[in-house]
Structures are given as C-alpha cells and as structure tokens.
Amino acid sequence: MLTGCPPVSGPSPSDLRGQVDRFHHDLRWKYNNTVVQRVDPEFAEDFLDVLEDLNKDLKITAWDVRRVKVVEEKNEKTGKKKRSARLKVHLTYYLMPSTVLHDENVKQVWEEQGGRWFLISMKGGPLTFPPPEEGDGEN
C-alpha cells in the first residue's frame, strides 16, 4: 500500500448503516484491527484483546440487523445535539470445539462522535462490549 493514500473502499464514517454492516462483516471474517476502529476508542485495545483470545474459537456464520432506532438528544447545558442508535442484531455463531449453532439477538448502542459512529455497548451473543474488567467476576 502506498503511504499517504486514503483507503480505497469502505463506508463513510457518518454512514451508520455502512459502519454497522462493515463492523459485522469484519467481525465475521476476523479483521480485528478494522473491527476495533469502529468501537469506542476508550475500550478499543481491550476489545482487541478479547477478539484475539476468541480468534480460533468464534465462528460467526451470519448476522442480520433487525431494528435500528436513532435517537437525537440535546444537551441542555451546551445546546449541542447528540445522536445515538439502538440496534437489535441477530447473530448466528458457534464456539469451537462445539459446532452447535447459536441464534441470538444482540443489543447494540452506537453513538455519533465528531461525525463518526462508534459502538458504545453490546449485550448478548458471544461478546460483551465494553469488555469486562479483570477481577470483576466475569470471564
């Protein structure tokens, strides 16, 4: 790749649906370094560690975004608008060595920050985001 060249493909950072689809595509195909570019930067490094730990075992076979609800709120102190999105995503996956398929609905929250959409939280399915802190009783 040539130094200084912009990426050739990919959705606009302000395109929620494109960012969500690219996140799940990259998660499925284990492009972990691009997955973490779409998560809350505060937890990106920890999430990358979780992905790398599951790299050999987690196999996502399909995903389907079932519902998207965009919410716009106004900060009463600053007057600035903040947009977030609540998603329901259906994941089909298995965790090796088992080949039993799991079908689960995952709840995700995305937030727009500086014109870019980032995953803020994910509950359900094989991954939790933000990742649990060490010593909090979760694996």
Image: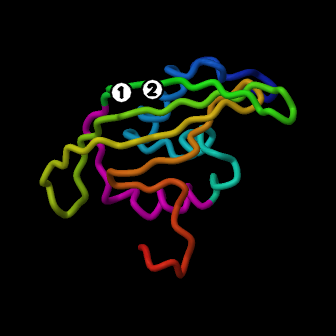
Query: Is residue 37 rendered to the left or right of residue 80?
Result: left
Residue at 70% of width from left, 53% of height from top? 42
Vertical placement of 49 versus 115: above or below? below
**Three-letter amino acid code at disc 1?**
Val
Residue 90 shows which numbered tag? none
Give neighbour class at mark 2: few <14, some 14-19, many 20+ (Cα, 10 Å): some
Task: State the image coordinates of residue 113 (x, y, percent, origin top left).
Answer: 72, 33
Say what secondary structure mark 1 lies in: strand
Residue at 25% of width from left, 45% of height from top? 104
Quadrant housing residue 127: bottom left
In the rendered image, residue 42 lying in the magenta stretch gets the answer no
Magenta extent: 46-63
Residue, disc 1:
65
Quarter of the picture holding the C terminus: bottom left
Task: State the image coordinates of residue 67 (x, y, percent, origin top left).
Answer: 37, 25
Q: Are marks 1 and 2 in contact (CB under 8 Å)?
A: yes
Say what secondary structure mark 2 lies in: helix
Near-viewer residue (123 or 23): 123
**Looking at this rendering, what residue extends furthest in the right direction?**
78
Query: Is residue 97 rendered to the left or right of residue 23?
Result: left
Near-viewer residue (7 or 118): 118
Residue, disc 2:
21
Vertical placement of 125 versus 97: above or below? above
**Three-letter amino acid code at disc 2?**
Asp
| Mark 1 / mark 2, whichever is N-terminal | 2
Query: Is residue 40 rendered to the left or right of residue 115?
Result: left
